[in-house]
Image (tube, grey):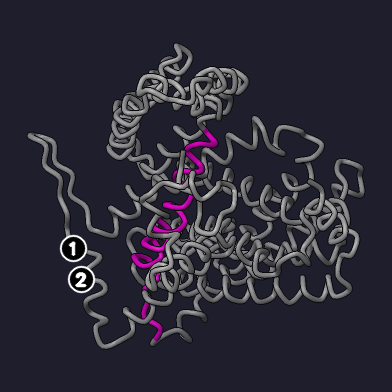
Amino acid sequence: MPILPHGSSDLADDDVWKVGPSYLASNKPLARLVARPIREFLRVEAAGSVLLLAAAVVALVWANGPAASSYDSFWHTPLAIDLGSLRIEESLQHWVNDALMVIFFFVVGLEIKYEFVNGDLRDPKTAALPIIAAVGGMLVPAGLYVVIAGGGAAGDGWGIPMATDIAFAVGVLGLLGRRIPSALRLFLLTLAIVDDIGAIIVIAVFYTASVELWWLALALALLVVMFVLQKARVWSIPVYVVLGVATWFALLQSGVHATLAGVAIGLLTPARALLNEDVARRYARQALVDNHLDPDELGRLRFLLGESVPMVERLQSALHPFSSYVVLPVFALANAGVQLGGIGEALSSSVALGIVAGLVLGKPLGIVLASFIAVRIGLAKLPDRTTWPMVLGAGCVAGVGFTVSLFIAGLSFPGSDVLTDDAKVGILVASVVAAALGVLVLVLATRGGVPEIEEEEEAAVDTP
């Protein structure tokens, strides 16, 4: 029996453990004034975005302050792993981008798998509008970038403005609260997930310089082994962790970006529960008949309860906080530090101008235009209680391409720090402008409120 939160009235005083409430639930000053407020903050939908933004600000201050020289020297510190004849040596920044970000892309793969099996991407009619809108929101920004940046080395960054940052986009809507219809949130979330699929394809196909076929074949073979083990109902997580690390290393050696291992493994993760939850319920009732649980019963009950929930959902629940509150802020800290002394010159470059135009103008234009055509020809319909100004606002918010855009920028100009820095400046400016513009448009579009939705939500809350 878990210790209930402090103040809970679900149990009588005699039933509460003699040790009292946990430290977090206690009335100690540190728990009351620090620990619990932090816990509540981390539960807020926009918390991950706030931490991501804070990390980017710290990186900018660090890279432009008195200790500016230490920023590059720290993140370019070499770090090597030696395992006998096997040696991997990368800078700290590359370890973040090539290894730590695997967790982020793994969570993205889990989200995609869930949406295809249990979510909105399962129903083509429901998913039609955000899918079509996402395609428009990728093609138009890329086209605008190419028109502005032209060919040559600068033209290689065409994939940068195609991306949408899920964490920031959902966080911006979270800041607006209940004035945003839930259907619009779902539209933007599905659009961002489809956008991520597009970004993954772009990275795999267009930002892979050369491929070592033997290593790639090994990575694919390991993925096949994982698939076969899953079909054989092998459910030992350590086995898949070992195979996953081996797949990551094989992809790293192959030349294909190693983070795609996370996406591939996420897509292979089972999205259906091993057991029917009724089995766990029946066993729990039988085990508790004598009001006593022995270690064997407890172990079996844990297994039954755990396997009654799909692995995709369990891993998402376990890894999403780590991805949002650790991986992405560290990534921003390692990549967002650019010199702002020449920001005017950087913004006048074709790379930065192409990115700003693509994210701030191309995203909403592509999303609204594609959505309008799809609705007009009958392929899709607007979400419930959603207006075209709201779609425009969501399109503006989708122009926040922070995380994935920075990631693609690092792949686009491997031989030019100047072009990379220009791209980063463009991404930072475009993301801020897109977020502010999106909030403004959505506030104006929902000025009258959405009373029908609020009434239905309140009724749902009041219904036992």
Q: Residue at x 28, y 53 (%)?
A: 95
| Tag shown at residue 280 | none
Q: What's the residue type where badge 2 is placed?
A: Ser
Residue 195, given in percent of the width and then of the height, sits at: 61, 49
Is residue 401 rendered to the left or right of residue 180?
left
Check disc 2: other Cα within 10 Å, few if <14, some if 14-19, many if 20+: few
**Crowd rating for badge 1 (residues with CA inside 10 Å; few <14, some 14–19, many 20+):** few
> Relative to residue 57, is residue 370 depicted above or below?
above
**Residue drawn where x is 41% and y is 60% of the image:** 24
Residue position marked by numbered label 1 in the rendering: 77
Determine which residue is flagged by label 2: 73
Magenta span main SS: helix
Q: What segment carries the magenta color?
A: 312-340
Closer to us: 69 or 169: 169
Q: Position of residue 5 (x, y in %)?
A: 50, 54
- Figure check: 14 above or below 425: above
Element assignment for label 2: helix
In the image shown, does 108 or 298 lie closer to the viewer?
A: 298
What residue is drawn where x is 22% and y is 57%?
A: 91
- Residue 251 higher or lower than 301, as above or below: below
Q: Amino acid at mark 1?
A: Thr
Residue, far left: 84
| Label 2 with label 1: CB-CB less than 8 Å | yes
